[in-house]
Image (cartoon, grey):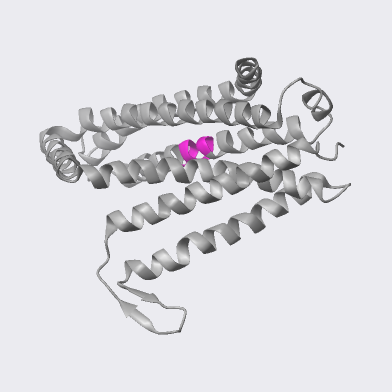
């Protein structure tokens, strides 16, 4: 049944997400040609630097680059928002009448939605990576030999740094995954909790609860690690303790916090789903 729920949610997401993917593809193509235009303008190949229109063309190329990257960022934000809009509709609005009549457990219901959302988030991330690669290839083609050599040196240094610190690289990936899972369940848990405590304006209550929960969680996950970055921590007695900052330890702590919070919000979501949230 979990597979059937996943397929249903995946298809429901596709109706909203495919147009966003098309927009990302269009922005990537525009970004590729804009990079060619930017490099050609900046090098003086398209227009002489002494020409009256040089500044205007260069400004247009730079503005186009900014707008394209802004559009890609907005597209990823829209994909994320649509994931939670889909969750809200299927769990809180009239559609929830059908959702809660399915012969499944609350855990299966929440789990299927998480898996479908995770797959679409990965698809969106891959689309953005491909778009970035296409834009980067435009910069490489138009940047000239010196630029290409500089990029080769940069990537070599990055890969060497990662290869020299395999544990840190692994912990970075693990921390990012744990934070993403925690982020998903803290929002879905906030949506269900906010919508369950009121009878009217549940959408407004859900949004307000998201902001409140995110503020509290971000405060918890950032205040002490931030102090640690600067090489000191504050003890419960009020004394200041100085120590050497260890990135691996910090990543392990952050991962542990994310896992604990994700489990808590998962439990909250399942508990509320078992009671079938107040339906509009």
User: Left or right of 75: which side holds 253?
Assistant: left
Q: Is residue 17 left or right of residue 232?
A: right
Please name whichever residue, 240 or 230, is drawn nearer the observer in this view of the structure.
240
Give residue 213's quadrant in the image. bottom right
- Looking at the picture, tell me which residue is in the foreground, 171 or 142: 171
Q: Which residues are magenta?
A: 70-76
Residue occupying image coordinates x 19% and y 35%: 143
* Residue depicted at 41% across the width and 27% down the height: 126
* Residue 80 x, y percent position in the rendering: 57, 37
Q: Is residue 13 above or below residue 250?
A: above
The picture places residue 4, in percent across and down from the top left corner, at 64, 15
Residue 42 image point, x, y percent: 24, 41
Residue 52 visible from this viewpoint:
no
Query: Would you place residue 268 above or below residue 20 in this image?
Result: below
Where's the N terminus, which quadrant? top right
Q: Is residue 191 left or right of residue 37?
A: right
Quarter holding the C terminus is top right
- The number of callouts visible is 0
Residue 67 visible within the image: yes
Q: Is the magenta region chiefly helix, strand or loop?
A: helix
Q: Residue at x 37, y 45 (%)?
A: 59
Is-magenta flag for residue 226?
A: no
Please give left or right for residue 46 compared with residue 180 in the image: left
Residue 18 percent across, percent down from the top left? 57, 21
């Amino acid at each position: 049944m979990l597979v059937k729920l996943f397929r249903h949610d995946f298809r429901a997401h596709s109706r909203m997400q495919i147009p966003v993917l098309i927009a990302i593809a269009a922005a990537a193509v525009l970004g590729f040609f804009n990079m060619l235009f930017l490099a050609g303008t900046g090098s003086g190949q398209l227009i002489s630097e002494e020409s009256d229109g040089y500044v205007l063309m260069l400004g247009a190329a730079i503005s186009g680059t900014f707008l394209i990257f802004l559009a890609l960022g907005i597209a990823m934000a829209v994909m994320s928002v649509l994931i939670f809009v889909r969750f809200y509709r299927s769990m809180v609005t009239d559609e929830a009448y059908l959702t809660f009549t399915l012969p499944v457990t609350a855990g299966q219901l929440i789990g299927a939605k998480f898996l479908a959302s995770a797959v679409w988030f990965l698809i969106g991330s891959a689309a953005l990576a491909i778009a970035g690669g296409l834009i980067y290839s435009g910069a490489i083609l138009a940047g000239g030999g010196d630029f290409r050599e500089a990029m080769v040196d940069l990537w070599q240094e990055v890969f060497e740094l990662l290869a020299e610190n395999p544990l840190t690289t692994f912990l970075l990936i693990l921390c990012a995954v744990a934070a993403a899972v925690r982020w998903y369940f803290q929002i879905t848990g906030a949506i269900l909790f906010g919508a369950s405590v009121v009878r009217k304006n549940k959408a407004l209550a859900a949004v307000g609860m998201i902001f409140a929960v995110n503020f509290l969680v971000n405060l918890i996950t950032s205040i002490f690690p931030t102090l640690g970055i600067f090489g000191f921590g504050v003890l419960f007695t009020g004394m200041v303790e100085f120590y050497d900052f260890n990135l691996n330890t910090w990543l392990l702590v952050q991962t542990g916090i994310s896992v604990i919070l994700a489990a808590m919000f998962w439990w909250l979501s399942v508990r509320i789903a078992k009671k079938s949230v107040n339906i509009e």
